[in-house]
Image (cartoon, grey):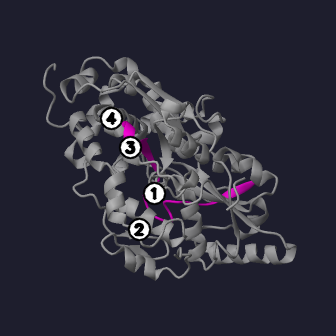
Amino acid sequence: MPDITPPALPPTLSRRRLLQATAGGAAAATGLWPLVTQAQGTAPETRAAKLGFIALTDAAPLFVADEKGFFKKHGMNEVEVLKQSSWGTTRDNLVLGSGKGGIDGAHILTPMPYLMTTGAITANNVPTPMSIVARLNLGGQCISVGEEYRDLKVGLNDIKAFGKALVDKRSKSGKAVNAAVTFPGGTHDLWMRYWMAAGGIDPNKDISTIVVPPAQMVANMKVGSMDTFCVCEPWHKQLINQKIGYTAFTTSELWMNHPEKALGLRTDYVSANPNATKALIKAVMEAQMWCEDPKNRAEVAEICARRRWINAPVADVIDRVKGDFDYGTGRVEANSRFQMRFWKDHASYPFQSHDLWFLIEDMRWGYLPPSLDTKALIAKVNREDLWRAAAKELGVAAADIPASTSRGPETFFDGKVFDPANPKKYLDSLAIKALKTA
């Protein structure tokens, strides 16, 4: 793929109580707020962490944790949230680590910590052990198509017609038709591949899949470098505002409330700093709760749009952050059930069953070997135990803590079912795949 001690707290602190306590922002962090950290847990081993992010709205929990003082509230006074130009740059800086001028962790595509831990995407295939300590969001991505396909009004269930149009274009022009994603084996790559394959389009043979950094998607569509792309916001809304294309669907239509980005940390940071890690998780949890509250969504959008974060017009950000979708085709949904989730529906908890699906799909497309011991790898990378410990220290209500590490069987738009208890059955059911051979 080409690469273009204080008074005791109540036994549980509900999400509503937490949100009420934050009213007015960080300035309200007196009284109850400091008690959460001081009354429970142990002081962090370090107050520092360098965390990377890509200019996407699903990095909002990191922006808010910084802007609203949640990192500092939990003793992490020296957290730096640093913009990365691409997922490849994120990977490279994670390989370096902060001690060598890189970063300790990042807002990251969920499969990437696994691909790094196995060495599948690192230089000379040297593993960089990584840990997933929280999920950052559910859903919130989209697939858009270029203006030349306006008459087709492509939607989720129109993949066969769209695929035919792509193949016909290739045949007539003699040139490749391109579907742009953000990183090989990452979430956007897998959403695009799943959609294409569900319509009988082989993403390895019938089209070309190219890698483009998120912030460059719209510019590349404008000059005709691609026919369709998958990424997070605000780039789809910007595409529509610039009249270059339209949104075919948002990815929770493909798989309702699918897992998306994670908070990933180098495993050596987690091992050396377990309390600091929990402090980071708690700060991000509180930021996720704040982001989830509809009353805060407009401010979330304004924060995201700032130059230090996404650096985009608020008009390109605000609608979809608020859950309002104008697809650019006449389809308009207010407060869409497909909107991004930051805390609701257990959005923050890193279900191991979800990580398993990503591993199976990366096997499907040849990024990982079919012989991979997924159970052992997930046990190594997925630190849901730290998430639970942090939630307990924070006083998160029991209803917001999943009882199981599995969300159970998942159903996709085409009727396929992924049962984490039998992943082989799911993989065998997929007609189009490109398994790696020995």
Q: Is residue 288 left or right of residue 387?
A: right
Q: Quadrant of residue 279?
A: top left
Q: CA distance from mark 4 to mark 3?
A: 9 Å
Binning the other alpha carbons within 10 Å of mark 4 as few (below 14), some (14 to 19) or many (20 upward) gives: few
Checking the image for residue 354, the label placed there is none
Q: CA distance from mark 4 to mark 1?
A: 21 Å
**Mark 4 touches mark 2? (CB < 8 Å):** no
Q: Secondary structure at mark 2?
A: loop
Checking the image for residue 372, the label placed there is 2
Q: The magenta stretch spans which residues?
A: 243-269
**Mark 4 touches mark 1? (CB < 8 Å):** no
Disc nearer the start of the sequence (4/3): 3
Tag 3 residue:
267
What's the residue type where badge 2 is placed?
Answer: Leu
Q: Secondary structure at mark 3?
A: helix
Tag 4 residue:
272
Residue at (25% x, 34% y) in the render: 394
State the residue in front, 258 or 290: 258
Residue at (24% x, 58% y) in the render: 404
Figure quadrant of the N terminus: bottom right
Disc nearer the start of the sequence (2/3): 3
**Mark 1 touches mark 3? (CB < 8 Å):** no
Q: Is residue 175 left or right of residue 375?
A: right
**Mark 1 touches mark 2? (CB < 8 Å):** yes
Tag 1 residue:
118
Q: Is residue 24 visible?
A: no
Percent coordinates x, y for residue 156 in the rendering: 58, 68
What's the residue type where badge 1 is placed?
Answer: Thr
Q: Is residue 56 left or right of residue 352?
A: right
Disc nearer the start of the sequence (1/2): 1
What's the residue type where badge 3 is placed?
Answer: Thr
